Amino acid sequence: MRLFFQILSYLFHPILIPVAGVIAYFMITPKYSPLEFQGGNILPIFILTVIIPILSFFILRNIGIVHSFGLPTIKERMLPMLIHLVLLLMILYQVIPNNYTAEIYFYFVGLVIANLSAFLLLLMNYKISLHMLGLGCLLMFLICLSIHFEINITIALSGIVLITGLVATARLYLRAHSRMEVLIGLFIGTISQLLTVTFWL
């Protein structure tokens, strides 16, 4: 069971959430989007939010700043989270304007709000579940897309709800977080997306 929950935590790691939301958007939207346009969004976002953070982790581990990919301590989380925030802002100001899509733009505004909130909590010596923060963002974004485009994606939403529950269970089972850290992470993730809804829904 422990191995299953560890695999689950890696499969739905927070660094995958930004690109997952963009891919989900292009799968759901009824708007026509040529492959070149989709690639112009997905590829740079994948590089900036997945490849660079992984490379950064190995560099930080080699110089002794972090020791585990799970970043279990508040001290270990500081620099990786700051790097992640900078990369999200780069996407917001450099990548998305070149292929502007309102829904994706405000999805990333929500991600910045969520991650900034998590970082500020770190400064106050309190960590939250970044897994739940990310899944909360993704779940609320999909719900908003379903309402926005008036498309029934009940099966997809049910799947994300199930995954969110399993990942929450995994984080608790592995003792990576307390119940409150899991709940606060989910709350911040969902609320951060709701704050942007009025600008595009």
Image (tube, grey):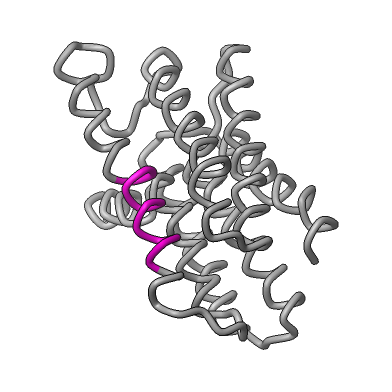
Residue placed at 58% from the left, 51% from the top? 97
Q: Nearer the viewer, residue 48 or 141?
A: 48
Decide which of 171, 12 is in the foreground and name it.
12
Q: Which span of residues is magenta-colored?
A: 39-50
Give the answer, above or below, for where 80 lies relative to 21.
above
Q: Residue furthest right?
A: 198
User: Looking at the image, is 176 positioned above or below residue 8?
Assistant: above
Task: Look at the image and say whether residue 183 sits in the magenta stretch.
Answer: no
Q: Is residue 49 magenta?
A: yes
Which percent across, then down, holds residue 23? 45, 68
Residue drawn at the location 44% of the way across and 61% of the way down: 20
Instruction: Choose between 61 and 126: the one closer to the eye.
Output: 61
Q: Residue at x 45, y 80 (%)?
A: 34
Task: Quadrant for the N terminus, please.
Answer: bottom left
What residue is drawn where x is 39% and y is 45%? 15
Mostly what secondary structure, the magenta segment?
helix
* Front residue of this view, candidates 69 and 200: 200
Q: Position of residue 126 (x, y in %)?
A: 58, 19
Q: Is residue 122 left or right of residue 56?
A: right
Q: Residue furthest left?
A: 62
Residue 100 lies, in percent from the top left, at: 60, 59
Q: Where residue 70 sits: x, y (%)?
A: 32, 33
In the picture, the quarter occupied by the C terminus is: bottom right
